[in-house]
Amino acid sequence: MSISSILFFLLVGLFVVDADLAMQKKTEVKMLLELANHHATFAVDPVLKTEGVIDLLEDEAMDRFEERMNQNGGYHRELQTFVPANNSVTTDSLVFTRYYIDFRAWRQDLDIYLRYNGKSLSQDRLVPGASRPEGGRLHITVVTEEGEELRLAPKTMVGPSHVVVAFVDESPFLPLLPGHSFPVVSVEELKH
């Protein structure tokens, strides 16, 4: 076997390892978001709850979200970014945005368009759609710096919901490999 063949197989192996690491990171970031968002959705307004209205206290929800991201993943928040610690899943920061779908709007379809500019993730536009008695469908599209549209799998809401979308833009395992960029979403119904 020639040296060029060995180098070729080594390079292919590095691509496979790098892709596997990216998939593991995507799964772990998704799990972190789900756990943190679940904790956030317990921040329900106690006064309105006694009247039968489930509504989110958004500042408390973000505090609870941040607390879990720190406990479970070692991340701390700086504005709209979660900065990793040495033992976090990602080596680069996670930018995120959130949206609350309240008790008046959860039965209506909603398309959320987000824009990632390399440093932040922001809402581009919200497009309401048809109403459905069983719960609206949520479609999320992230437009990257290059103009690529990344569509996340649609979700069906079953009640007032807290939506958090993070964008992972991770450096490669080795400098000669391409980086990995992908959005991750968590949609959690408010806890009664």
Image (cartoon, helix red, strand yellow):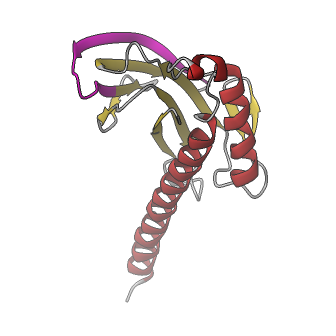
Residue 109 drawn at (x, y percent)? 27, 19
Give coordinates of residue 191: x percent, y percent: 53, 36
Q: Residue at x 51, y 48 (%)?
A: 30
Q: How many marks?
A: 0
From this view, report whether residue 1 is shown above or below residue 81. below
Task: Indicate the quadrant containing the N terminus: top left, top right, bottom left or bottom right.
Answer: bottom left
Please say whether residue 55 is visible from this viewpoint. yes
Q: Which residue occupies the foreground of this view, 178 or 34?
A: 34
Q: Position of residue 144 (x, y in %)?
A: 43, 26
> Residue at 52% across / 31% down in the picture?
164
Dominant SS type (magenta): strand
* Residue appearing at x 70%, y 52% in the figure: 73
119 relative to 90, above or below: above
User: Is residue 1 magenta-colored?
Assistant: no
Q: Look at the image and give the residue range highlighted in magenta.
A: 120-139
Decide whether residue 138 is among the magenta residues. Answer: yes
Query: In the picture provided, is 69 more to the left or to the right than 191?
Result: right
